[in-house]
Amino acid sequence: MELFTEGDPIADTKAPAGPVEKRWETRRFEAKLVNPANRRKMTVIVVGTGLAGGSAAATLAEQGYHVKSYCYQDSPRRAHSIAAQGGINAAKNYRNDGDSVHRLFYDTVKGGDFRSRESNVHRLAEVSVNIIDQCVAQGVPFAREYGGLLDTRSFGGAQVQRTFYARGQTGQQLLLGAYQALERQIGLGNVEMNTRHEMLELVLVDGKARGIVVRDMITGEISTEMADAVVLASGGYGNVFYLSTNAKGCNVTATWRAHRKGAYFANPCYTQIHPTCIPVSGDHQSKLTLMSESLRNDGRVWVPKTKGDDRSPKDIPEDERDYYLERIYPSFGNLVPRDIASRAAKNVCDEGRGVGPTKLGVYLDFADAIGRLGRKAIEAKYGNLFEMYERITGEDPYEVPMRIYPAVHYTMGGLWVDYDLQSNIPGLFVIGEANFSDHGANRLGASALMQGLADGYFVLPTTIANYLASGPLEKVDASHPAAVEARTDVEDRVQRLLAVDGDRTVDSFHRELGQIMWEHCGMERSEAGLRKAIDEIRALREQFWQRVKVSGTGEELNQSLEKAGRVADFFELAELMCIDALHREESCGGHFRAEHQTPDGEAQRDDDRFAYVAAWEFTADGEPSVLHKEDLKFEYVHPTQRSYK
Amino acid sequence: MNLTLRIWRQKGPEDKGRMVTYPVDDVSPDMSFLEMLDVLNERLILAGEDPVAFDHDCREGICGMCGLMINGDAHGPQRGTTACQLHMRQFKDGETIDIEPWRASAFPVVKDLVVNRGAFDKIIAAGGYVTAPTGSAPEAHSTPVAKANADAAFESAACIGCGACVAACPNGSGMLFTAAKLTQLSLLPQGQPERYTRVIGMVDAHDEAGFGGCTNAGECTPACPKGIPLNTIGRLNRDYLAATAKGANNTPGS
């Protein structure tokens, strides 16, 4: 059977015409407005409380809408945006180092290896400056200079210092700013907050998104919540690999359920492997920990020049070390983009020059920086990261170089959205990492926080009004046949998972799925490997539904049941990721096909055949998905072979 | 390593709860504490027993979701470390380890080691913010902030809301948590307009949520994985006193 079929291309992304720098202004002016008195009568559901969802829920409530917010954690403050370390980009040009909105736009399109939409990226760059203002006004304690002004640093893929930061905890501080704005609205009664609730289904009425089915994770009660529009801000799907830097609970269920209801899933194979994570230490490993990319500002990456050199790093003299990033990429050095740094690490390890007990690691060495700036300065910049490293590995990075290795970190793919961040299902909006829109095939460092907050604070609140103003929508409640059907489906699925009562745990399946994905759909992909992976995933999924063991019942706090539902969805996503990776016969950004590389081993794009967004439509279980292509046009940033040499 | 775990098991809020003993063998010193519990849970599931419910998410010490009393210490024996970042090399082969939930009247047990910390959110909703609706912000550089104040605000803002301070406090007080947010915002110019209404609102919400009062026992700071200093509570008290003297109350505009 065919793996997929091809459907109609996507003709219109709803971006206004005209010069790129005028499009957002045009959109804002053309967007219809909702009268403040009418906003109170409209309900918007927001799923997820990270940077995108938290800021969107707070802003929509400030504007007067009735908001229902959902998160699976015990508090909205715990969403995984909190773990972002390094910083947030903004085109403020406070350094007077040649930055501008246009340069941030250019860097992001180029960094994404020419697989993102110019209109969206330009808007992101424009809005970036407002984000910093907003966060400072909220009391986000950004790092400052002695003069009292904001400090910035440089990040991978950029030659200007445009990254604002709060020590190594920028995501935490930005998220707490959004969370506090959200709590203020909760206190005022404008947001109904539902913690420990997981979205398990989307409800469509007359083709429009009108509600969700949620499970109360404490009581197990399954209920249907209706609204005028639904916003998914449920994050990325990196946990399909089992081991990733995502939080344990991060999952694809909300977006995957929407996909099964008709929302296109775009570019699922674009995953970001972050170059600087702590290497795996054993089979018990449950997650991977990132060491911020900002460390590459002062740390130098190296491996021994000779294979199998088992000496302690201190005993390897300078001339027997290979600072391979500085050697191969002299102009960007240790600050090359993430996809390039990751693959370079893989290559030196594949050559047998990896370090540490598993030989899957490279050194990130701070000796020079400590010598130049002093230990105190390094402590002030990275103290918390160094402590975290020592707690996990038992080694002191002030004395011994860190060992790092790439790990799955972020997913650029996600639900397809138009310029308004609306999916192809009317009334279903998707923001933050959950959508696909701004990063192309590779996201630059410090751009995830920027996109999450741009979407939530500024873009969605404008564009969703345009949709809501087209109403009023017919009043529907949980007794609507479509709502009842969605809820029954969820109840049936829960019972099916509990009924298997097999002999393998959910985690054992998830781990095995992750190994297949890492092996064949990770840093390097090939046709043979992907075909093998698709067969293996299908076989393992069949095993899952015959052998999984979920303990307990549906009517209680049941963490094994929660995991089972998420892993069941990961199985389906995994197959689509491999199909997407297989069909894309080129290398671009985080998607590296072994068959498509330049003579010196860099990603070789094929713009003639693949300068498009691959948006996948679900048909039915066991039936091939339909591919819809959205052609990408580059009017301002002309595709070139990316070079960081 | 071979260990004996004694874990608090409680089916739900109405259940009385009890300590149950579980031997765990073949523990690697490189495992995190939660990975060791994962291993136990895998075994319990296959044996048809109910796995131990515990909260966790990021497993990198920042989300604040995990929280266990380990041998009577909030987050265990290593200072400045959350339970998820605690590694088994901190324990000895053959050791018996007691694992219990946070115990405080403001944090009722949900199941086993899972508690409800919603009271913390209520404290924030009562004033732990700067009122700055989206779009209303002035240019970020219009108000410089002395680096020392910005850095000190950051130190307090580092709180992860895990609740270890409450669990460690003999009174079950949430003052360190409350004071951390108040200190952050009162050190910044953006936090000044609401400074005194904020402190009254948050302290009232703290008391209403059932937290105990602070008697300077000083158990909170050593238990705090982020080392929030005790003097933040002193700052809270000064602002609270000033607010009462000014006659500020929780009503905006007064």
Image (cartoon, coloured by chain):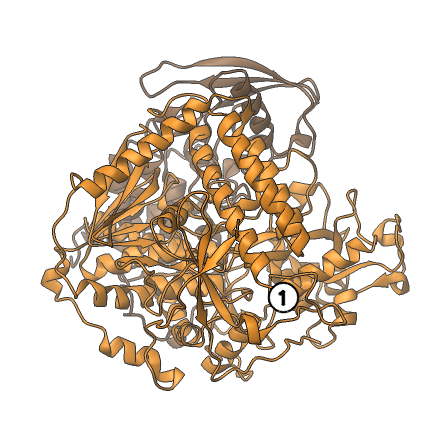
Quadrant, the C terminus of chain B: bottom left
Please state which of residues A120 and A621 is positioned toward the viewer in this rendering. A621
Residue assigned mark 1: A587
Please state which of residues B149 and A498 is positioned toward the viewer in this rendering. A498
Instruction: Note whether A145 is above or below A168 in the view shown.
Output: below
Percent from the top left, x then y, of residue A428?
A: 30, 56
Tag count? 1
Rendered brown, the chain in question is B
Instruction: Note whether B179 is above or below A99 in the view shown.
Output: above
Instruction: Name the residue located 66 percent from the left edge and 68 percent from the top edge.
Output: A603
Q: Residues within 10 Å of mark 1 (few under 14, many from 20)?
A: many
Q: Determine if residue A644 is in view.
A: yes
Rendered orange, the chain in question is A
Q: Give the left or right position of residue B211, taking residue B184 as reference.
A: left
Instruction: Note whether A15 is above or below A280 in the view shown.
Output: below
Q: Give the left or right position of residue A425, taking residue A380 as reference.
A: left
Which amino acid does the dot numbered 1 rest on?
Ser
| Residue at the bottom extreme of this rendering | A19
Please tell me in which quadrant of the rendered image residue B42 appears: top right
Q: Determine if residue A365 is in view.
A: no
- Mark 1 residue element: loop
Percent from the top left, x then y, of residue B158?
A: 47, 50
Quadrant, the N terminus of chain B: top right
Instruction: Name the residue located 89 percent from the left edge and 56 percent from the top edge.
Output: A316
Instruction: Note whether B205 is above or below A615 in the view shown.
Output: above
Percent from the top left, x then y, of residue A256?
A: 41, 48
Chain letter for mark 1: A
| Residue at the left extreme of this rendering | A37
Percent from the top left, x then y, of residue B105?
A: 33, 26
